[in-house]
């Protein structure tokens, strides 16, 4: 008898919250009993964006997939939600029957607005991440405004351009000036790096605009370390300098934009000297970047969501993203700006997640305001959490956790790991991973649609989110058809569209190929004038033009630094974590010396009386945490940085960094203001 091979490789799309949406080559190891498990993750060499390598996060997925503490059976809380309670194994029927009965009681006594789902981007799959909302919309439950990350940027982009289109990464090597603005792309968009390197070989100069020095700063040719929250001032100063020297594109402005005269007038006060004063940069640095953008194009700007994490973050991003309309770079291959490419995925989403059932009078909860929503008098009596870890990632996390501990709140958590949220649940329902269920994936960094079949059998009794909510729907007698759709039903609905970008993309082709590029005009054409140029002749705004109005302006934040709180806290993404995903992987979180650090400038360390490697208290108006100090000139005076949303369990004091952050919302889109936090340091 011929022995079966001990390993095999499959290719699947990464489910995590990243613009790269990589196509991964996954090695499955076969045991003597014939069972298989994930043993290695690399990148698919045949995928146009992934190009054969996996990021520093995803290579650790086998440790997460095979984690010894992964929940594999339904768990029910016995006893209280404090130290006297415990989670014990029960059957699926017991868990689902009890959840359904308790939910019926909540609906009868308090109505559907007492039921809240809390979810986000633990999976980017449209079935297990989005379509499962059908259950809650069939109930008439609260609508969750999913605003913690992208809505400030989305609202800003929509005002200027309409739908979010971006430069295809394959066109980036045609750029000659590249500005990475408010994004640590080597950590959060790592598959852009080979295209940036190719552009550099072609003669491009790379600039990084960011308040602290990180991997991307060291990769770039020039780093501009601006003051946090001053991005709009820098953008307006650059626009003024470009116009003053006649580097703007008058033809493009006349043919494709509206409101430029008002924008030009608003930018006039932002002289080089005033812009330097506001941003902390030098006159020379600002003038040099303006010259590069005006004289050495095309210019490609890759913006991240970092600049939107301030009170005026939407306005800041809007100012930056209008610069390619000033220079006319939208008409040049490799020129323009990318926030997200998601607008190109013109799927039919009318019934995705039963969106058609949302009524105008539905109660809405902004996910940044979960702490307030879980207050005893706020009216939420049932909370279902999936694809996120709000006990760690939500603002004002101490109050979030206090709300979760309420005895009158039923909390059900669908999870792949025993997160801090799961540890507070009344029921933990074991969820499948992306190799164990089928799903379909878009991207916000490239232009290929992805599909994954279920590749491994689920371990233990783990089940997909879609199965769990369908079973609950049956117990509650819900008749909404979308709740019970198969993967075939979902694919047929999503691809039921005449949009030209999806021409030739069928369910059968998607299943067969796994990754299918969109049919974008000019994407694969030859020549420097070709490429995908989404705003070449205008935009998707009501006027059909790129809108310079309403005019963005620099406005100082209300949370000004004071003698009591003299430092601005930034909490950007870490290199090895994806939000809080991987927070339980031992060799990332429990190795000697591997813990969250606060980066402090030497001047501020001296003023606070803290030293390198010492534990320090960080105090804000919301709460207090302890972190080990790293004294470094990578940060600027007045700014402290804690990279990554570590689990509180990995921190010296067992507390999430979001115990310091507030529920304050952005000027546009109701987004989060994690970088708005003012703090003080003292020795622990």
Image (tube, rainbow, N blue to C red):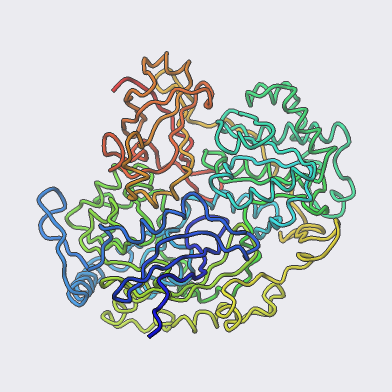
Toward the viewer: 121 or 55? 55
Counting every numbered tag in the picture gives 0
Q: Quadrant of residue 462?
A: bottom left
Q: Position of residue 150 (x, y in %)?
A: 53, 52
The answer to whether 182 appears left or right of 619 in the picture is right
Residue 544: tell me if it is visible. no
Q: Is residue 660 above or below residue 386?
A: above
Q: Nearer the viewer, residue 343 or 45?
A: 45
Is 219 drawn above or below residue 533 in the view shown? Answer: above
The residue sitting at 80% across, 48% down in the picture is 329
Compared with 503, 674 (above or below) is above
User: Looking at the image, which residue is at 87% across and 45% down?
Assistant: 249
Which residue is at a point 23% across and 74% down the rendered structure image?
96
Q: Quick check: 368 left or right of 446?
A: left
- The outermost residue toward the front is 1
Q: Position of residue 439 (x, y in %)?
A: 47, 73
Nearer to the camera, 443 or 233: 443
Q: Position of residue 397 (x, y in %)?
A: 32, 44
- The percent position of residue 209, horizontal first and vertical second, equals 64, 35
* Residue 520 horizontal side relative to residue 415, left or right: right
């Amino acid at each position: 008898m011929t022995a079966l091979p001990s390993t095999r490789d499959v290719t699947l799309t990464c489910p995590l919250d990243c613009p790269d949406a990589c196509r991964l080559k996954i090695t499955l190891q076969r045991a003597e009993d014939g069972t298989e498990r994930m043993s290695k993750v690399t990148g698919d060499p045949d995928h146009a964006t992934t190009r054969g390598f996996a990021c520093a996060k995803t290579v650790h997925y086998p440790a997460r997939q095979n984690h010894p503490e992964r929940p594999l059976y339904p768990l029910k809380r016995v006893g209280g939600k404090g130290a006297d309670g415990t989670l014990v194994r029960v059957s699926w029927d017991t868990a689902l029957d009890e959840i359904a009965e308790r939910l019926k009681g909540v609906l009868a006594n308090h109505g559907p607005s007492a039921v809240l789902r809390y979810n986000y981007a633990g999976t980017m799959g449209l079935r297990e991440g989005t379509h499962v909302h059908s259950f809650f919309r069939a109930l008439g439950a609260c609508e969750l405004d999913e605003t913690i990350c992208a809505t400030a940027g989305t609202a800003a982009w929509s005002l200027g351009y309409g739908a979010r289109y971006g430069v295809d990464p394959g066109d980036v090597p045609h750029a000659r000036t590249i500005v990475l603005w408010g994004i640590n792309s080597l950590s959060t968009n790592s598959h852009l790096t080979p295209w940036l390197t190719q552009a550099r070989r072609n003669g491009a100069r790379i600039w990084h605009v960011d308040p602290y020095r990180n991997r991307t700063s060291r990769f770039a040719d020039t780093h501009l370390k601006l003051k946090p929250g001053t991005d709009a001032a820098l953008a307006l100063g650059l626009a003024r300098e470009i116009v003053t020297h006649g580097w703007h594109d008058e033809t493009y402005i006349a043919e494709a934009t509206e409101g430029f005269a008002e924008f030009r007038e608003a930018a006039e006060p932002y002289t080089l000297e005033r812009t330097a004063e506001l941003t902390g940069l030098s006159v020379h640095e600002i003038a040099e970047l303006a010259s590069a953008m005006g004289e050495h194009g095309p210019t490609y700007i890759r913006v991240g969501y970092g600049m939107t994490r301030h009170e005026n973050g939407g306005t800041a991003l809007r100012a930056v993203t209008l610069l390619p309309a000033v220079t006319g770079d939208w008409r040049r291959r490799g020129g323009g700006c990318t926030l997200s490419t998601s607008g190109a995925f013109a799927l039919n989403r009318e019934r995705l997640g039963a969106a058609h059932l949302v009524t105008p009078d539905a109660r809405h909860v902004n996910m940044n305001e979960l702490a307030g929503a879980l207050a005893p008098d706020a009216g939420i009596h049932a909370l279902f959490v999936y694809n996120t870890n709000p006990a760690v990632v939500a603002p004002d996390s101490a109050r979030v956790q206090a709300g979760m501990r309420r005895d009158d709140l039923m909390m059900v958590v669908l999870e792949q790991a025993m997160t801090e949220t799961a540890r507070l649940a009344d029921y933990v329902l074991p969820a499948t991973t992306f190799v164990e269920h089928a799903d379909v994936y878009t991207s916000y960094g490239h232009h290929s649609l992805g599909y994954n079949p279920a590749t491994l059998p689920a371990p233990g009794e783990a089940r997909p989110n879609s199965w769990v909510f369908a079973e609950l729907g049956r117990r509650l007698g819900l008749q909404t058809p979308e709740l019970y759709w198969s993967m075939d039903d979902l694919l047929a609905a999503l691809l039921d569209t005449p949009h030209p970008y999806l021409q030739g993309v069928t369910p059968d082709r998607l299943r067969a190929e796994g990754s299918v590029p969109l049919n974008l005009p000019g994407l694969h054409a030859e020549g420097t004038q070709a490429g995908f140029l989404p705003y070449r002749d205008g935009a998707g705004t009501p006027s059909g033009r790129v809108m310079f109005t309403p005019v963005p302006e620099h406005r100082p934040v209300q949370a000004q630094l004071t003698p009591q709180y003299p430092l601005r806290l930034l909490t950007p993404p870490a290199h090895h974590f994806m939000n809080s995903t991987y927070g339980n992987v031992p060799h990332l979180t429990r190795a000697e010396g591997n813990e969250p650090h606060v980066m402090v400038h030497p001047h501020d360390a001296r003023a606070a009386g803290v030293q390198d490697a010492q534990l320090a208290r960080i105090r804000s108006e919301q709460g207090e945490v302890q972190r080990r100090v790293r004294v470094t000139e990578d940060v600027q005076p007045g700014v402290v940085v804690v990279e990554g949303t570590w689990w509180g369990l990995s921190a010296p004091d067992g507390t999430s960094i979001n115990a310091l952050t507030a529920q304050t919302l952005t000027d546009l889109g109701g987004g989060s203001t994690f970088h708005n936090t003012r703090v003080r340091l003292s020795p622990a």
